[in-house]
Image (cartoon, grey):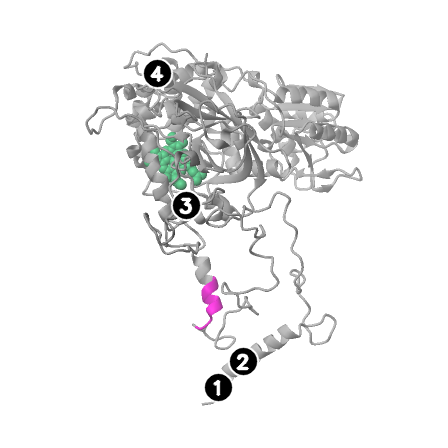
Amino acid sequence: KKPGKLVKAAVEKAVDKVTEMVNPPIPGVPNSEPPSLDEPTEPRAPLPPKPDQTGPETVSPTGAPTGAPKLSMGQQGEFLTTSAGARLYDTDHSLKAGERGPTLLQDHHLREKIMHFDHERIPERVVHARGYGAHGTFVGYGTASNVCKAAFLGDGVETQVFVRFSTVLGSRGSADTVRDTRGFATKFYTQEGNFDLVGNNIPVFFIQDGIKFPDVIHAGKPHPDREIPQAQSAHDTFWDFVSTHTEATHHVMWNMSDRGIPRSYRTMEGFGVHTFRLVNAEGGTTLAKFHWKPKLGVHSLVWEEAQMINGIDPDFHRRDLADAIESGAHPQWELGVQLFPDTPRQTFEGIDLLDSTKFVPEELAPVQPIGLLTLNRNTMNFFAETEQVAFHLGNLVPGIDVTDDPLFQSRLFSYLDTQLTRLAGPNFNQIPINRPHAPVNDMFRDGYHQHAVHAGVAPYKPNTLDGGNPFEASAADRPFVEVAQPLPKAAKVRQSPASFSDHYTQPRLFWLSLSPVEKEHLVRAFTFELGKCYEQAIKERQLRVLANVDPTLCAEVAKGLGLPAPAPAVQPKKVAPSPALSQVGKTWPTDGRMIGIVVDPADLDGVRTVRETILAAGMVPLLIAPTGGPIGDSGLVAQRTFLTARSVEFDALLLAGSPPPGPDAAPARDAKAGAPGGLVDPRVVLMVQECFRHAKAIGAWGAGQAALEASGVAGAGIAVGDDATKVLGEVAALLGAHRVWERFPATIS
Ligand code: HDD
């Protein structure tokens, strides 16, 4: 049977195509197709990777360096191939029975391409799905050596790390600046194996026993019927749970405080939360809590700002971290420990160290610095690194052991278990980002995604066929040995110790430690969140909880909700506030702070000087002009326009002047016309007003003062004058306190 017309045409076309491949069309030659203008037709070197994109360490599944080039796969080689390595001549057309005919099942490239795409997504983390990671180094100070024998804490020992920050409730694509707890998980690739410190930016947790974790998370996640609301706790199920479950009160207090909306990952503390047991070279044990202290200080957003950012730049925190690392402003945290004697009661100053809803104030046990973390390299591939990283509390090294905190104990199960679904099998430690940098010699075999080609015949012990390998380490070989902790004489029970039932003393301590403005923020957060609940009974119940924390707190929230304030049911205990908990009243370095400068075409010298001074001080100047591109012939380039700039990006705003409104300005009636210096663009007015409302420092010189006047702002935290450098100096000084706290005196004391 002769081939049909269509088949014949297709065959002819395929032949043409192959001929064309062998003899590509020559530009300028008749009947030859012009090359595409957008994509190179000949292979050429790809754009070089950015300086910080050096890729993950390449080590074999046994941990040995492979020496393989770091930029291993993708967009590097000359020819497109199938995953089996066959070169392809066309990836744009499926194989069809003729141009208009059906697609053929035999098109193995089409099937492979679509099959792989269909499976590109893996399940997001059941919690902490939204996150961002970076590589760095950790250098031990040696100051922990008397209490902990872990080699990576030794003086000057440098260890590679990977850190992933996250929110808890939101899905992978949710916004960064929602009100939530932040995860702060660190993988130390030590010479003695991986150590994972999987902490949060809040030192206490919602629950005391991991068996309740599914409950608190089900309550916090969107309602199961409508899947609303995304990435937030301001809804009925969350407050239903926490109002009936008073051990969550302490964590909720921190969430509703400014800690729930950090300014940046770089300005966030981290806490290991649980008490760990440290072991020194002599076998002596000490109980310890881990802390991360950011070099830039602890700063937060204000609520309106956080909400605006969710729309304006949902990637605010990840962008901030990546930009800082790429620009060389490497964020740093000191690792510190609070140490407690390892007594049989495992309490300190009456605080139960096995209760994760309690913390130990720094005034009672100082945080002693033991090492420095520096994040200095962005990921090269988000999926390969940040998405596939798998933390596990059981990744411990000699010198660091667990305690019997029931929350800690249940986590030891969960983090292994969850990866079986998320990373589809038990071999997830072979994924490059999870591979230890210490040699691996386990007897685990096979399973999905096995990458190792294990040699030998005897993956069992004892064996003689493989020469008895591998051998169990003796004490001199520094194995991980569990502390032989004596067990209490007890019966198997589903119960908690009596000390776990004090749910109000520490929330009260937290409340009393805040400055008036922080208290006001906390009151407003409670009022906002409860105000979003529909069920009256939930609001009333939560007010009863707050009354037990502090009557003023309860009364203020009740006022906002329009409800009567109930009387406390529990007599408040006497507590000493912990000044270390307040973020206000301290001065911090200003490195990396963002300063927006509205340029003045008439005073570009002033703008240039100010920009250079800001850069020299380690801060980031961003020039804002009506339109993008070069600013006149000054050599300066606008980085933001009136269309793309929004106040929330800046920690402070400088007004060098107010150029005439840009081409896309809103109708002039929105602006206050007639200000000296001419018409002020309404978006500049808005920027000034927002910065003012968010208690940010504002500076203006020369014609810039017209924008201030048009915005109608005045009072504390506004520097004006004719000398640009002097104005900048005043603004930088204000930035050290992060915000102009006195601009809106708080009414709660
Ligand atoms: Fe958890 C992820 C922190 C209690 C079960 N948790 C996860 C992450 C952080 C924390 C930072 C993200 C890790 C990453 O970036 O990949 N979790 C905490 C802290 C807790 C805590 C500080 C209390 C002190 N978690 C907790 C309990 C359970 C879990 C009580 C279960 C019993 N957590 C998980 C998990 C996750 C997780 C389901 C989800 C993804 C993952 O582990 O790898 O296993």
Cα–Cα span, label 4 and label 2? 82 Å
Q: Residue furthest bottom?
A: 1
In terms of sequence position, does the residue under pointer 3 or pointer 4 come before the other? 3
Q: Is residue 281 above or below residue 78?
A: above
Residue 172 location in percent, x, y?
A: 45, 43
In terms of sequence position, does the residue under pointer 3 or pointer 1 come before the other? 1
Which residue is disc 3 drawn over?
124
Mark 4–mark 2 CB contact (< 8 Å): no
Q: Which is more toward the observer, 553 or 469?
A: 469
Q: Which segment is the magenta one?
A: 106-113
Cα–Cα span, label 1 and label 2? 10 Å
Which residue is disc 1 drawn over?
3
Element at label 4: helix
Which secondary structure is most common in the magenta stretch?
Answer: helix
Identify the residue at image location x=76%, y=21%: 723
Q: Is residue 178 above or below residue 512?
A: below
In terms of sequence position, does the residue under pointer 1 or pointer 2 come before the other? 1
Residue 168 location in percent, x, y?
A: 41, 36
Instruction: Report ligand 1 position as a quadrant.
Output: top left
Which residue is disc 2 drawn over?
11
Which residue is disc 4 drawn over?
505
In terms of sequence position, does the residue under pointer 2 or pointer 3 come before the other? 2
Q: Quadrant of residue 119?
A: bottom left
Callout 2 environment at 10 Å: few (<14), some (14 to 19), or many (20+)? some
Residue 746 location in percent, x, y?
A: 50, 15
Callout 3 environment at 10 Å: few (<14), some (14 to 19), or many (20+)? some
Residue type of the residue flagged with mark 4: Thr
